[in-house]
Amino acid sequence: MKPLSSKLAILADAAKYDASCASSGARRSGNGKGLGSNEGSGICHSYTPDGRCVSLLKILLTNHCVYDCRFCVNRMSSDIPRARFTPEEVVALTLDFYRRNYIEGLFLSSGIIQSPDYTMEQMIAVARTLRQEHAYNGYIHLKAVPGASEDLIAEAGRWADRLSANIELPTQGDLDRLAPEKRRETIETTMAQIRERRDEAEEARAESPANAPRFAPAGQSTQMVVGASESPDATILETAADLYQRHRLRRIYYTAFSPFPKADPRLPVQAAPLVREHRLYQADWLMRHYGFEAPELTTPDRPNLDLSVDPKLAWALRHREFFPVDVNRDPKSKLLRVPGLGARNVERILKARRFGRLTLADLARLKVLLKRAQPFLVAADHNPDALLIDRADLGLKIAAREEQLPLFPEVSLSAATGEL
């Protein structure tokens, strides 16, 4: 039997490929009783020397798996060291790490052992023990195993703050080729069960806030692997938009595929560029907070996002007829499409313009990135940069102006993978 430290080394490393583990968005308090707390603003984060966030104890219950997904290092046919925790060991680790102030939450996933129901039961046992026997009020994120019974999904949501059922790949065709045991329909059935239970809990809470049962108050998320299949960004974004609409996900996480030793020959031999993952996060942000539709962010002849420029600026350069936008007259929906205007900038503009017409100097005081925004807007005073809108080299001129400034100020590279 492996010692606990060896298991931890194996199963913490095996969990690093699952990115869908943001911790904010839930509030749980024991009213002064029990161990820990979980505030709605998110838990405190600590960082390893290489910059990774390690605020959660992020582990697998086991990396044994009955599935043979080609893109997964933990697949059944993979020649890797294997380990398995008991539920009691995960509970002990979580409490020990919490008391040492290493973590304030748990992210628990697992390979599939025996069956989806058995695996789900094992993870539920961890969360139930922490909540009931140790009065643990910290954050818990459980992986919802697609195919597990509806009763088990219901119980998991009772103890967990967030659940996530990974869609893995954007199309059923991709799953057929790289994860033949998995069905899109099964995964989405689990997502639908979580959504329905959350709706029921919210309705009950509206009627009786004090006595309503909790169900995954931080919602659900999912993950898609990018670059393992040939599906372009357009397909990935269409799948994301569909999942957001039908299952009301809180977040979708994108993970650039990284080759591993002895990988299946059908997989790419080179890693997907990390900047592609970043552009997908930016495009996702535009869909969720800026009113963009998935088909707007790519074109039929270029179905992948431009890696050299952020999606918002790329859209603006393709749709110059939309500009300039008048910051003193145009509605919020148009202001949100101006490169260099973030959502907070737009809210400040809408409030400030009620008291007078805004000039470029006013916009600068409102923290607008004028180096990027000026060619796309007009203010109360003269704006010679508005004449640049028809120049073919406008994108290059903006990049030259900004020098080292991030091309997408609303979402930084480090922030894009967390809950913003």
Image: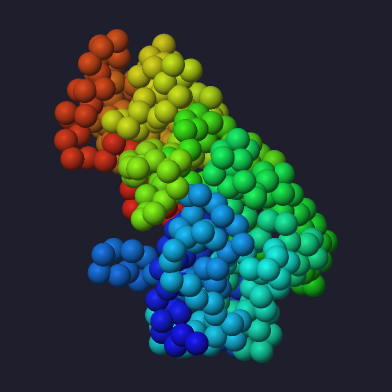
Which residue is drawn at the image coordinates 61% and 40% (left, top)?
A: 176
Vertical comparison of 159 with 405: above or below: below
In the image, residue 111 lies at what x, y percent? Answer: 57, 65
Numbered-mark total:
0
Q: Nearer the viewer, residue 80 or 201?
A: 80
User: In this rendering, does residue 154 appear at all?
Assistant: no
Vertical comparison of 48 with 279: above or below: below
Image position of 111 (left or right of 5): right
- The residue depicted at 49 percent of the width and 84 percent of the height is 93
134 w.r.t. 171: above or below: below
Residue 352 position, x and y percent, is: 42, 37
In the rendered image, residue 329, in percent from the top left (x then y), is placed at 46, 22
On the image, the x and y values in percent for residue 248 come to 66, 46
Foreground pick, 113 / 305: 113
Residue 157 lies in quadrant: bottom right
Q: Residue at x 72, y 49 (%)?
A: 186
Q: Is residue 197 visible?
A: yes
Relative to 60, residue 255 above or below? above
- Closer-to-camera residue (368/308): 308
Please state if 54 lies on the left or on the right of 69 as rendered.
Answer: left
What is the basis of the colouring in this image? rainbow
| Residue at 28% over, 31% down | 308
